[in-house]
Image (cartoon, rainbow, N blue to C red):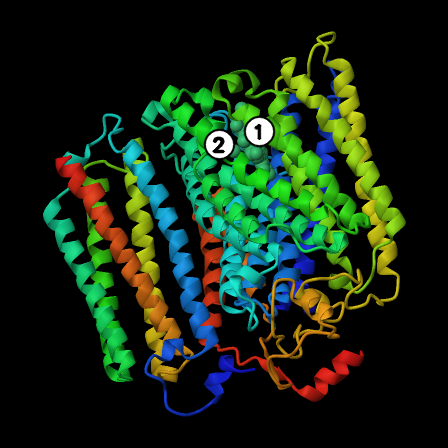
Amino acid sequence: MTSAHAEHVNGELPHEPEKATLEGRNKTLGFWLFLGGEAVLFGTLFATFLALRNSNNDGPTAAELFSLPITAIATAILLVSSLTSVFAIQAMHRHDLQKLKVWLIVTVALGLAFLGLEIYEFYEYVAHESFGLTTSAFSSAFYTLVGFHGAHVAFGVVWIGLLIAQLYRKGLTVVTAPKVYVSAMYWHFIDVVWVFIFSVVYLLGKVG
Amino acid sequence: MDWLTTVDHKKIGILYLIAGGFFFGIGGIEAILIRLQLIKPMNDFVSAQVFNELITMHGTTMIFLGVMPVIFALMNAVIPLQIGARDVAFPFLNSLGFWTFLFGGVLLNLSWVMGGAPDAGWTAYTPLSSSTYSDSHGVDFYTIGLQIAGLGTLIGGINFLVTIITMRAPGMSYMRMPMFTWASFITSAMILFAFPAITVGLVLLSFDRILDANFFDVAAGGSPVLWQHIFWIFGHPEVYILILPAFGIISDVIPTFSRKRLFGYSSMVFATILIAFLGFMVWAHHMFTTGLGPVANALFSIATMLIAVPTGIKIFNWLFTMWGGQISFPTANLFAVGFIPTFVMGGVTGVMLASAPADYQYHDTYFVVAHFHYVIVGGLVFGLLSGLHYWWPKMFGRMLSEPIGKWTFWTFAIGFHLTFFVQHFLGLLGMQRRIVSYLPNQNFDTLNLISTIGALLMGVGILLFLYNIIITSKKPKNAKADPWEDGRTLEWSIPSPPPEYNFKQTPLVRGIDALWKEKMSGNKGMTPAEPVGSIHMPSPSILPFIMSLGLFIAGLGFMFSREGFNNSFMSFIFNNYLVLIVGLLITFGAMITRSLIDDPGYHIEPEDQEEEEKA
Ligand code: HEM
Ligand SMILES: [Cu+2]
């Protein structure tokens, strides 16, 4: 067959290797659609949170719990990691494998830092504020929304980690490039979701 | 073994058909049991608890495990052929979607033998579905089984979307796509936006039940109406996810057997899109009686009635297609034409229900039951039976028997109207839905008896269809490429059943009804768009099966994580989440394997293509 087979044409890697094959293009498109579904998923979680955010059932309220400095740092970390993943893709377009790996590693490291902060935050709530999943409808909605996002970050960290390993083994090819590209899309997506969480959960909780 | 590892969309279609058919059978048996219980007043054929389980499992099984997979079977079997593609966009994911559906369905049905099926209705309304009122594991099987099966549906939806967007043959513009492909395209988009909502709903409900979260628990600030919103924001689009493919089938079958092109093709396309769009705007018409208030009720009422406009356009287009055509009535077309009046009746009762004040009377009566069975059985199941009879030769290379097919149609259709027509009156007379029995002499007795007789007759129709399949499978595979002789679309331009690679040469499409167009210009077949060459195919893989198995194990692990077992070993592995973890490890392990080992696929060379052609 034709374009699906560009990978057998051993020659120059094209400028945008992620779009060189039909598989690669399909992957990108499929992933865009998948993110559309993810948007509905988070949308439903946000709606649930908004419906229940004042139902704290004698448990702690949002205003009592949240500490904006910590979440602001977390936000900054995640935003920077989006930037570093852009650098990674730019390196990929320059076919600079070395830089690509470095920027991905930085991205993963930032992701881990974010997760560390989140775990610390949850630990504080549970240990010192007796605010657990079962405390109130608000707590259930909070942990589910923020936890879902955290799980997405964790998944992304493992995923990009594995991709880095693949880049070490196989280098940059028309097979690995689409994977890197969609993982960066994913990373931006969870970043955007976090921006919403920061506004809707934390800012609104503190001031709203 | 071949079947466990296949990534060929045609074989996956057959797998969906077998599995969907199997669950359809289970759902059918449940239906018959329900009707036997209601055959006479004060019957004690089954207990109230079992009755609740039966109605819950009947609805759930039919919608999620019966008709959805059969729709997917036809989509898999037909879409790539209709758009002139050699494959779907993601063959591996296609197989994964099938296996997650199957394992989810098996998990759900295991509930029958593992301590009680779900018993809170197919809508699982809280607080009925909370652990307070439903304390067996039934609803856990529901949340987790549907979660796993729903994943498969979502994967399938994305796969079809990408396939249709990127894999169309040269010349196959959007406005030349056959209607079944169009309908499947829109359906897939609806799946993409509706299923994540129920995914969240099921997670929340299982958190409430298994982890003691408080989403729907009023005492802790939760809200049961929230569940209804989440359920119906998925649930109403879901009913259009079910019916649009049937519209697509009918739109392909009627022109073929009228020897005329579809009347108003572009209006059909836009009506489909409009229905899908409106489908997302009307979910609260299921909740008129929850107290949303007059403003919300009025808005949702009007939005609902608007759907009748594009639906009406479709109905008239089908009628105009037949008008003046040279109509013939093989079984496929009988079901297609039989679909029109039944669906119209369902639509009319739909508009009646959409009137909020009237709905206060109809709600939760047999009138609603009659309405949705008219659209789902009289619409969708008729459509599926039409499509199955129509594409059977393409899928299996054998023609179903026409005389038996006619018997199937008449017994099924008559049985159907007997069963559900009278239920409108039962509802208007005040018989509630979901009740295990009723008192004598309330004018319910005779109508219920008729309804049960009708259900048995429908059962006979389905048995005849099965009999037809069995005797057909013993016949030689001699169906022609274009067995109806009036085939209009691309799937009829290649052998029945198609070779592994579908099209030896990708065809060049020159108009709507591509094959018909060539026939009319005096050509024998499609003009190829590329020279004969080596064809690349993806390799089979067992990983999708293993991933789904892992999810299945993890699901059981999660569900029983709080269970008090008598056996200390069982307690140890379940209560410490070991089973859950092992299951997830299996799934993630298979995912990692997949990502590390690239699939080079294989090639079918032109010589071998010749051989396959002769075989
Ligand atoms: C012509 C368009 C339609 C309209 C205006 C309409 C309207 C309605 C309304 C207002 C209800 C709620 C009744 C109540 O619970 O009191 C309802 C229930 C229902 N409809 Fe429709 N409907 C239409 C088409 C369909 C189609 C095409 C399907 C499926 C293929 C469908 C399946 C259902 C189901 C399953 C229920 C009952 C859900 C339950 O409570 O268990 N409807 N419909
Ligand atoms: Cu509805």
Residue B423 sits above or below residue B530 on the image: above
At x 32% / y 38%, what residue is drawn? A47
> Which residue in the protein does label 1 denote?
B350
Residue A159, x across and y down, in percent = 36, 66
Which amino acid lies under the numbered mark 1 shown in the image of this protein?
Gly
Q: Position of residue B227 (x, y in %)?
A: 42, 32
Question: Left or right of B442: which side holds A189?
Answer: left
Q: Is residue A68 left or right of residue B542?
A: left
Ligand 1 location (quadrant): top right
Amino acid type assigned to the residue bearing label 2 in the image? Thr
Earlier sequence position, callout 2 versus callout 1: 2
**Residue assigned mark 2:** B304
Q: Residue reaching furthest bottom?
A: A11
> Image quarter for residue B38?
top right
Asked if residue A186 is positioned above or below residue B296 in the image, the reply reads below
How many numbered tags mark residues here? 2
Q: Are marks 2 and 1 on the same chain?
A: yes
Q: Quadrant of the C terminus of chain B?
A: bottom right
| Mark 2 surroundings within 10 Å by alpha-carbon count, few (fewer than 14), some (14 through 19), many (20 or more) | many
**Please, what secondary structure does the residue beneath circle 2 have?**
helix
Viewer-proximal residue among A149 and B442: B442
Query: In the image, is residue B191 above or below residue B489?
Result: above
Say if disc 2 is inside 8 Å of ligand 1.
Answer: yes
How would you rate the neighbour count of disc 1 (Cα within 10 Å): few for under 14, some for 14-19, many for 20 or more? many
In this view, the residue in front, B609 or B529, is: B529
